[in-house]
Image (cartoon, rainbow, N blue to C red):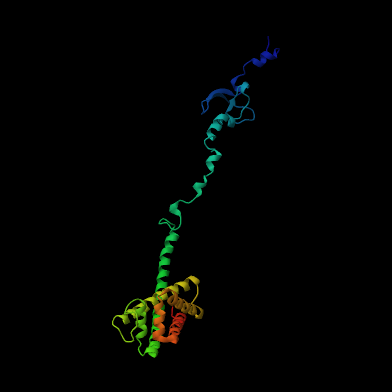
Amino acid sequence: MDNRMNPERAAGTAEPEHQGPRPVPYTYHDGREDYLHVGRREGAEPDQPEALVPPSEGVTSPLQATSPPPEAASVAAAPIASPPEATALPPEATALPPAATPGSPWATPRAAAQRPQQAIRMSEIVTRGLRTGVVLTAATMCTMMAASTLKRGSPWAAMNAMAAAVGLGGRRAKDRFDPIATPAGIAALAGGLLVWGIGYEKALDAAGRRGGALTGALSALGGFLLDDLVLPSRLMKGFRDTMGVAGTVGKYVALGVASAVAPR
């Protein structure tokens, strides 16, 4: 029977190779095998490959054919995602370790740099305090020696009273120079006023103030309270005996004035 009379047989007749693309076996990089149609088609570029997909699998594009299956993508993405618990840090992890706390030997460089500055500042305070103490000693000693000269006729009586207060030179202060009591009294007075000057300058630095009339008055009041309430009671008795009441008051006035005008 003529093929032109039987359309079904005509449709099953193989066409010559020059009338359509030629299937060529092709293996993809993932191991799958397929056929490519190689040949000239109407409206297409010469020898343009086209995948021949079986009808049971449907039509897929070349991009879809080269992409990995969904289960492979989910397996590859699984290690990237982390559980929510792993992203949260425990409270103790946010606290600074003891080595990073200020004041430790391993503190930050800024804290380590502040220590030399504090040492320099303290050295400056001590230097100013010693200068102030020298001024206080000179002013107070001259006032006491002048008052004892007027009261007892000897400038050493007040210094001997200082020695008697610390247990040197006997319980009663001598009027004349004593090789033990007089130097001991001068040393006790000078040492106490040098320490007083350092404490005075430290207090000014802590308060952020400069010396003046108010600070001088407070220094004089502090000196009086120290002698009257802290030191032995025989010290104030010896001052009154050797310098008189006016001379004793003059001693604290000299202390306050020297504190107010001492150079810094």
Would you say residue 46 is visible in this rendering? no
Residue 167 location (% of width, % of height): 34, 76
Q: Is residue 131 left or right of residue 84?
A: left
- Is the C terminus in the top left, top right, bottom left or bottom right quadrant? bottom left
> Residue reaching furthest right?
5
> Residue reaching furthest front?
171
- Is the N terminus in the top left, top right, bottom left or bottom right quadrant? top right
> Residue reaching furthest top?
1
Residue 10 location (% of width, % of height): 67, 15
Residue 262 location (% of width, % of height): 44, 80
Residue 204 location (% of width, % of height): 47, 74
Would you say residue 246 is visible in this rendering? yes
Q: Is residue 120 above or below residue 25?
A: below
> Residue reaching furthest left?
179
Q: Nearer the viewer, residue 29 or 20?
A: 29
Q: Nearer the viewer, residue 38 or 132?
A: 132
Q: Is residue 91 above or below residue 147?
A: above
In terms of image quadrants, where is residue 126?
Answer: bottom left
Residue shown at the point (43%, 77%) measured from the top left: 227
Residue shown at the point (42%, 86%) measured from the top left: 244
